Amino acid sequence: MSNEYNNNKEKKITDFADLQLRGLQWTVKHACRNSSFYAAKFKDAGITPEDIKSLDDLVRLPFTTADDLKSGYPFPLLSVPHHQVVRIHASSGTTGKRKIMAYTSQDVEDWTSFFSRCYEMAGVGPGSRVQIAVGYGLWTAGAGFQAACERAGAMAVPVGPGNIDMQCQFLQDLQPDVLCCTASMALLLSEEIKRRGIRNKINLKTIIQGSERCSEAMRHAILDYSGAEHLYDITGMTEMYGPGTGIDCHLHNGIHYWADFFIFEIVDPETLEPVPEGETGELVVTTLRKEASPLIRYRTRDLTRMIPGECECGSPYPRHDRILGRSDDMIIFRGVNIYPGQIDEILSEVAVDYPISSEFDITLNHAEGRDTMLIRIEREPDADSSQDQEVELMIRDLIKTRLLVSPEITITDYGALPRSERKSRRIYDRRQEQYQPA
């Protein structure tokens, strides 16, 4: 990348258009010249780097998908010689070959630089002690959280995931004021803090969590049980360097993303056309500085919306809403498209007035020629079952009114559903295995 472009990295930017255009032009030229994948992609689309004269030309570029990354295994999108690659990371996918992304030394430096902004936005810096309870190794999380923590001048406590006894011991003995983990791990550990009665023995003030959606009910439970004052949502994925591509500020009114490193678009996942500002669609990402594995109009499958206007916190960086879910997590039930996040939002509303917790799961079955949906929801700790039938009917009616389906609702004891240290599984679709042709 040109020195002129790199030299602008740390300048305070309030208008991103010029920087984004130069970054887009550099990325397209770099990818076309150095990646056989992108060269073929642009040729098929009839596009050359010289055609990119304004940001409006972005929509002329073809999309990149997860299938493209898998088909290019083991080095998809590689746009530098192998000797310039200093590191690789892989996605945590559970089926097929993993998506492996390559990094140059400049990529690692850029990632650490913008990730450290996330810590700074969350008020983490010199004097902070940060317990990092995410996966290390091939995954991007551990390396990203630790390097950026050190860059921000804070003390890193790299415990890694799991091992609840050690997590609780370090929270008491080392007195970290910041915890970094998945939302599921945050809930699991917060529940354990409450169960052990150690809330007054720890110093937890801030939780930075990512990797999965967290409902309002779940956020409330995590803060209540742990005693933390702030819970920040951090975003990112392996394809985009890793975590740290954005975070909410102390006002918690949306995710500020680093528009000097990325261009974000929101498109309709079916038509792939841009949606009106403020409407929900699929997040599409183009990187502006990534050397080894640049992304051009990459379909993340994450569902969100852009938040118009400036944030009252004073940050110049634009915002998108929390991730609603993934377009490929959509349930088709009796001809109706349903996202788990929609059910999550309804349950969070009910939890304001009734003693249900944030934990739920959905089981889809097929019997006697028809599909059925069972939603299991936990009660709050220590809540009795006297209101179960009333709450079950209320939730069923709300879902029927808003989503046009009629599920079976069951309220269970607190702790009855499985917990996870990584990502909680919400959907169990057993219809295919139960289907019997007539």
Image (cartoon, rainbow, N blue to C red):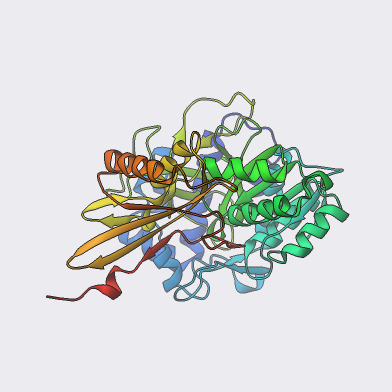
Q: Position of residue 115 (x, y in %)?
A: 68, 48
Specify whether 159 is left or right of 184.
Answer: right
- Extreme-front residue of the structure: 386
Specify whether 211 is left or right of 179.
Answer: left
Relative to residue 66, is residue 217 depicted above or below? above
Q: Nearer the viewer, residue 187 or 90?
A: 187
Q: Which residue corresponds to the image point at 47% horizontal and 49% vertical from the top-left? A: 285
Q: Position of residue 292 (x, y in %)?
A: 58, 63
Q: Quadrant of residue 266?
A: top left
- Is residue 242 among the parts visible in the rendering? yes
Quarter holding the C terminus? bottom left
Relative to residue 13, is residue 195 depicted above or below? below
Q: Which residue corresponds to the image point at 79% horizontal and 45% vertical from the top-left? A: 177
Specify whether 399 is left or right of 293.
Answer: left
- Is residue 58 among the parts visible in the rendering? no
Q: Which residue corresponds to the image point at 30% horizontal and 65% vertical from the top-left? A: 365
Specify whether 152 is left or right of 438.
Answer: right
Q: Position of residue 132 (x, y in %)?
A: 73, 57
Q: Nearer the viewer, residue 282 or 111?
A: 282
Q: How many marks?
A: 0
Q: Quadrant of residue 144?
A: bottom right
Q: Nearer the viewer, residue 328 or 351?
A: 351
Q: Position of residue 160 (x, y in %)?
A: 72, 64
Relative to residue 133, is residue 336 depicted above or below? above
